[in-house]
Image: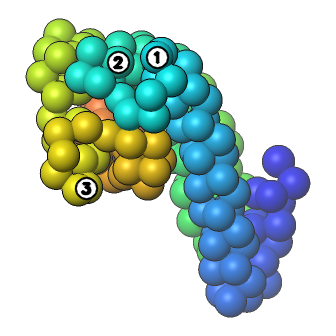
Amino acid sequence: SHELDRVMEAAMEGDTEAVEQLRHEQQEKAMEMNRAVLMELWNEFDENGDGVLSREENRRLVHQYLVASKIHLPKVMEESLRVSMELGLSAIEAQDPSMAHDMRKELKAVMKTIKKDLTAGVVSVLDEILANVDETADALLAEMDIDGDGQVDREEFITKFLAATSAVIKPERFQAATSSAMAAANEALHGDE
């Protein structure tokens, strides 16, 4: 993507200030996109239009969100992993272009191999969460309820959903799936070297 090219170019030039600025811009864009998605979810699941999510509305919303995450989250994690590796390669390229070239070939092979295992690991974690979706949804509702009134209004939902999701679902579960997929990719590519 054009954004990645800009980050890579700044990293190769050693312009850490530009890299940070671009990273900040990406975070802002991601927050805007998340806000838009959350508004869509709100509009779909505040079925009676009363401006608050009931326990049942929240449970349906969380279920739908987790099911959709089985499709989208592996792609997001794969892209994040690829970008991180590319940034690391940019730093190496400034020091040793030949080594970076060889490592770039390796990166392509790893990313090809990792996709299936990463998707399977992420889907497995989400399936575990979906097995207890009502408990998860109730815990999310409690996390989002800023004013303690037992309900979640639109502003509470928009400002707290992502943080509540991280607190309840625990991102480290997905990090373990990533590590496992990386280990499987390494094993597939290198065997018992």
Can residue 57 be seen at all in this image of the molecule? yes
Compare marks 3 and 2 and give the one earlier in the sequence: 2
Q: CA distance from mark 1 to mark 2?
A: 9 Å
Closest to the observer, 7 or 167: 167
Compare marks 1 and 3 and give the one earlier in the sequence: 1
Q: How crowded is the residue under tag 3: few (<14 C-alpha within 10 Å), some, or many (20+)? A: some
Q: Residue furthest right?
A: 2
Res 133 → quadrant: top left
Q: Which mark is residue 48?
A: 1
Closest to the observer, 164 or 129: 164
Secondary structure at numbered mark 1? loop
Amino acid type of the residue tagged 1 in the rendering: Asn
Q: CA distance from mark 3 to mark 2?
A: 18 Å
Instruction: Give coordinates of residue 34: x percent, y percent.
Output: 58, 45
Which residue is depicted at the point 38% across and 50% down? 156
17 relative to 4 in the view: left or right: left
53 relative to 55 in the view: left or right: right
Q: Which mark is residue 146?
A: 3
Which residue is depicted at the point 17% across and 28% down? 138
Res 43 → quadrant: top right
Q: Residue furthest front?
A: 50
Circles 1 and 2 in contact, beta carbons < 8 Å: yes
Q: How crowded is the residue under tag 1: few (<14 C-alpha within 10 Å), some, or many (20+)? A: few
Q: Which residue is mark 2?
A: 57
Image quarter hosting the C terminus: top left
Amino acid type of the residue tagged 2 in the rendering: Glu
Instruction: Give coordinates of residue 93: x percent, y percent.
Output: 70, 70
Amino acid type of the residue tagged 3 in the rendering: Ile
Select label 1 or label 3 by which is in front.
Answer: 1
Total numbered badges shown on the rendered structure: 3
